[in-house]
């Protein structure tokens, strides 16, 4: 949703920015995922037909 869409639904651009900031903070607070390690681990898993 863009800031403009937020305005059309009764919210302000500031409300939209605050929501994005809250989502960003929540994502940054969680553990980081090492996707390269995951790919390397899964590369050795055999898949049976």
Image: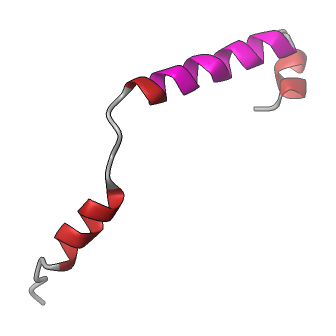
Instruction: Classify residue 15 by image quadrant.
Output: top right
Q: Is residue 6 above or below residue 28?
A: above
Is 33 covered by the magenta stretch?
Answer: no
What span is in magenta?
Answer: 13-26
In the depicted view, which residue is nearer to us: 11 or 42? Answer: 42
What is the chief secondary structure element of the magenta stretch?
helix
In the depicted view, which residue is nearer to us: 10 or 43? Answer: 43
x and y percent of residue 1 in the render? 75, 32
Q: Residue at x 64, y 19 (%)?
A: 21
Instruction: Classify residue 4 by image quadrant.
Output: top right
Is 15 covered by the magenta stretch?
Answer: yes
Horizontal side of 40 relative to 17 (left or right) equals left
In the depicted view, which residue is nearer to us: 33 or 23? Answer: 33
x and y percent of residue 20 in the render? 66, 23
> Which quarter of the rendered picture does the C terminus lie within?
bottom left
Horizontal side of 40 relative to 36 (left or right) equals left
x and y percent of residue 31 in the render? 32, 33
Q: Residue at x 41, y 23 (%)?
A: 29
x and y percent of residue 33 in the render? 33, 46
Q: Residue at x 85, y 25 (%)?
A: 3
């Amino acid at each position: 949703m863009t800031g403009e869409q937020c305005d059309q639904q009764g919210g302000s651009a500031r409300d939209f920015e605050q929501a994005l900031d809250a989502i960003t903070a929540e994502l940054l607070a969680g553990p980081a995922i090492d996707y390269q390690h995951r790919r390397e681990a899964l590369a050795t898993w055999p898949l049976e037909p």
